[in-house]
Amino acid sequence: MMTDFALPDLGEGLTEAELVHWMVAPGDTVTLNQVICEVETAKALVELPSPIAGTVGRLCVEEGDTVTVGTPIITFGAASVAEPVEAEPVEAPESDEGRSNVLVGYGPGEHDARSGRKRRSHSSRASTGSATVSAKPPVRRLAKDRGIDIASLVGTGPDGHVTRGDVVGAASTSSATVSSATVGADETRVPIAGVRKRTAEAMVRSAFTAPHVTEFVTVDVTATVELVAKLREHPSFAGVRVTPLLLVAKALLFGLARHPELGSKWDEAAQEIVTTRAVNLGIAVATPRGLMVPNVKDAASLSLARLAAELTGLADRAREGKTALAEFSGGTISITNIGGFGIDSGTPIINPGEAAILCVGAIRRQPWEYRDEIALRSVMTLSVSFDHRLVDGFEGSGFLRDIASVLRDPTELIALG
Amino acid sequence: MSITAPQRDLFEQVAIIDPESGELIDDEIYSPYLADIGDTDLREIYRDLVVVRRLDAEATALQRQGQLGLWAPLAGQEAAQIGSARGLRPSDFVFPSYREHGVAYVRGVDPAVVLRMWRGTTLAGWNPRDVNMMTPAIVIGPHMLFAVGYGMGILRDKTLNSAVDDIVIAYCGDGGTSQGDFSEALGFAASFRTPTVFFVQNNQYAISSPVGIQATVPIVQRAAGFGVHGIRVDGNDVLAVLAVTRHAAERARAGDGPTLIEAVTYRMGPHTTSDDPTRYRDAAELEFWRQRDPIDRLRLVLDRRGLADQEFLASVDETADRYAAEVREACIATPDPDPISLFDNVYATETALLAEERTDFADLHGLDLQGSGE
Ligand SMILES: Cc1ncc(C[n+]2csc(CCOP(=O)(O)OP(=O)(O)O)c2C)c(N)n1
Ligand SMILES: [Mg+2]
């Protein structure tokens, strides 16, 4: 008798995990609770113990694959002892089609949402996108099961609540089909999941709730570039990376101290504008897993050398996938350094929950007015996007101007800081 | 009779087992509380520690296999839990937090029953009256107030019957001491001199926050400010924990009021199965505490006395494995509750809205409104 083992929800509402490493191979004999593989969820790297004693049949998933919760990952042959598996109806899929041909990361999701009352329903999470629509959870679930976007319905219930009737009515007029995923000749379909999905949700939330304004300034940063070179030689900065980004960060903190609105937060629920004492400075980092924005806690309280060390550590940890969860939360303002990609300027989207993001362009040697003549100078374009609910052009412009003036002449930091 | 509160350097931890030799340290104040502990007791305490760790490992595995929604492992805290629980009488009452599986074990709660809440098949688990222990409190804080209220109740019983001398113990973590409820509980307990023991397992972390963030001074020091007696104990020394708990209980029984015990220990595993502790603590720290493992500590005592022979150790392993297998089987066999039972026991008298929701729910899922009547 073959038994499947399906990927369980390992962390209170997780929907998927990556299979990092198999520790068994087909034909291996395993004991109960012997570690069979390592998987990485959004929360943790976790070892999975075998649910039975028996023989490994097939590995249904390859290392590196992202697996949806509920998908069989391994089959076991004739269990030698453990009867418990017989009494384990929870995880095993009901039908053979469900089992035989699951494309990793696709397949079971839609099906499970409907059939498995034993599985967690993700309806509350899924409904966040339509948070403004009032409907009872079972109605939301019904809409989801029928593939209807509840936000598109007009509620006929009390206070505009969407009712079961509304959903059923809509279902009969639309022919909602649930397409199954394919890898065809002309197109490849990849499920939206993981970091990509979270980034998408964050960006949509920010772009469509915070009215963005973006301003630009181009500035001669030759003095900053020279200062960076000097600091690199200084013993206090031994062992840390000193880059123009460090001074941009310092300039931002200087500007923020003078224009605290740029570090505030819009609390829609409480109808309040919140300003926190600490500046938790987020840095957008491109990592192999996608875009991450960890932040340096209480950055304004740090010496320049400490800030350099923190920024170095932050970027390294993010690239290695070792960022602590706490580093992702509580950000108050962010920097995105597209100069690193050789790009001059852009209109960044604010990290949701924050008021502003500073976009740093590439530093280029180019002809520039200098002391009434044309000289070859190091020039950079900075842009800032801010949430116009919180910040008006007056403060936003002052903030950007202050940053530019510090980078034009870092003496300002000492003179005014 | 009044039990004097000994004054000690508050940074000092009470210890009984010498971690080098396994000899029992002669402690003027606390050793007398262990006078009755003989070889058989030492062995049974050891068995408890091993069994509880084994059950914990089985529960963690069951979570990884999809049989539990969540589990809060206790590994590393066995001595703090077994030692304190064994310092109580059956008629004393326990208010646990969510990690006290070891305490529940000593109180006689079936481990398979403990698992049901974590499997999501029950909201509570057992009848607190059966074992004089409340079901787990996930919300951190309020149960310490309940323990003070319960203590006030005991005092009232005492006015009717002077023989009443039960006490009540509340468990919380280092992080839990930051809750307002904790301070209120200590204040009230001191004012009313309730027979309450506050047992804080300082396992060094509140999820990922190291204790130093929330407590800039040893937690035991907080007691003094409220007029509560404080004891700091090596929480990995099961005999020391047993002794200080018996001492605190004795003071409470004698009408000398509340005690706060800070048991200094370490959570060897994750906060829960959803947590990845490697993100916030390093291997060296784990190793430091591994060297101070509570089971190894008691083992030193057994070895020294020649009590840890092969036969005994095999019987301990056999007990642990048998319990683990039983718990696994019972857990997997636990039936899912009828979904409609979700609406049971919400209010004593059902409201119109709830009735409507129940109907909607049944309607949507094609369920029988009566449910299983479970
Ligand atoms: C009132 C309340 N706030 C927050 C939480 C979330 N929470 C669950 S466990 C935990 C940490 C508790 O740490 P500690 O008291 O040290 O206990 P430990 O988990 O270490 O045993 C927190 C904050 C909660 N359950 N209740
Ligand atoms: Mg703790």
Image (cartoon, coloured by chain):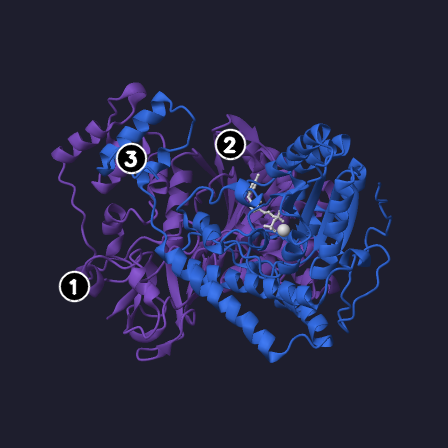
Chain colours: A purple, B blue
Q: Mark 3 — on which chain does it sit?
A: A
Q: Residue at x 28, y 65 (%)?
A: A4
A265 with respect to A212 (left or right) = right
Q: Mark 1 — on which chain does it sit?
A: A
Which of marks 1 and 3 precedes in the sequence? 3
Secondary structure beneath dot 2 equals strand
Secondary structure beneath dot 3 equals helix
Q: Amino acid at mark 3?
A: Pro
B87 with respect to A72 (left or right) = right
Circle number at residue A138: 3
User: Could you give the CA–CA distance between mark 2 and mark 3, rounded to whole angstroms?
Assistant: 31 Å
Circle number at residue A266: 2
User: Could you give the CA–CA distance between mark 1 and mark 2, rounded to whole angstroms?
Assistant: 47 Å
Query: Could you tell me if the residues under marks 2 and 3 are in contact, i.e. CB atoms within 8 Å?
Result: no
Q: Is mark 1 within 8 Å of ligand 1?
A: no
Asked which quadrant contains residue A242, the reply is: bottom right
Foreground pick, B314 / A203: B314
Can marks 2 and 3 be said to lie on one chain? yes
Circle number at residue A241: none
Numbered disc total: 3
Which of marks 2 and 1 precedes in the sequence? 1
Q: Amino acid at mark 1?
A: Ala
Q: Residue at x 63, y 43 (%)?
A: B91
**Mark 3, mark 1: which one is toward the viewer?**
3
